[in-house]
Image (cartoon, rainbow, N blue to C red):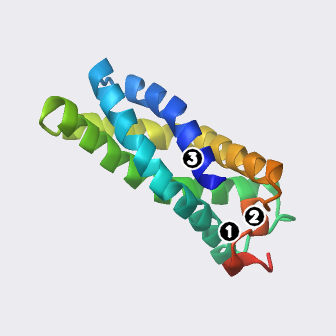
Amino acid sequence: MDTLGNVSFSLLLGGVIDYKAGKSLTDIIATRAISIPANAITGGLYGYWRELIFKKTRTRAESHWIRTRLVDILAFNSFQLPLYAGITTAGNLMSEQNIDVWETMRGVGYLAAVSPLIGTTLNWYMDRLRLVFGIKPAVKGAYNHTSSA
């Protein structure tokens, strides 16, 4: 479910972020085309990463909601920002045959700036999909390494 959540969420929102970063329509299409398999491959890893960050920070379901949101933002920024930088760079290389470092940095900067909204929204969305399919949310640990959370 983490893979489905990550792919569907990033396809829509990633396009908006690409647009805000000043990418052309060709760049946006190329970047989103790369993002689908990249997010399909990394979606489950991101779910695992979130749970690991919850475990390492000793954040539980009963922790204060501010703490759980901050941990969600930490998980998002430490995983999704480098992934987005790689995807947007590859998309730029595919569509323009060069790498625009400043465009990539603008996109990463914009994503970092809105990550308190996007990171928590993505994570909420992923957890809702988990619940629909009978899987524990990340803070409760569906993967074995956090089953005691």
Going 25% across and 43% down the picture, which residue do you hit? 90
Q: In the image shown, does 87 or 100 lie closer to the viewer? A: 87
Residue 50's spot in the image, x, y percent? 62, 63
Secondary-structure class at tag 2: helix
Label 1 close to label 2 by CB (< 8 Å): yes
Q: Amino acid at mark 1?
A: Phe
**Residue 30 image-quadrant placement:** top left
Q: Disc 1 marks which residue?
A: 54
Q: Disc 2 marks which residue?
A: 139
Camera-nearest label, 3 or 2: 3
**Residue 139 image-quadrant placement:** bottom right
Disc number placed over residue 147 in the picture, else none: none
Q: Disc 3 marks which residue?
A: 6
Residue 41's spot in the image, x, y percent? 46, 56
User: How far is mark 1 from mark 3, CA to CA?
Assistant: 18 Å
Q: Amino acid at mark 3?
A: Asn
Q: Amino acid at mark 2?
A: Val
Residue 84's spot in the image, x, y percent? 39, 46
Asked whether residue 100 appears in the rendered view, the answer is no
State which tag comes first along the sequence, 1 or 3: 3
User: How far is mark 3 from mark 2, CA to CA?
Assistant: 17 Å
Tell me if 127 is positioned left or right of 32 in this view. right
Residue 2's spot in the image, x, y percent? 63, 54
Tell me if 18 is positioned left or right of 137 in this view. left
Going 12% across and 35% down the picture, which residue do you hit? 97
Secondary-structure class at tag 3: helix
Asked whether residue 122 appears in the rendered view, the answer is yes
**Residue 57 image-quadrant placement:** bottom right
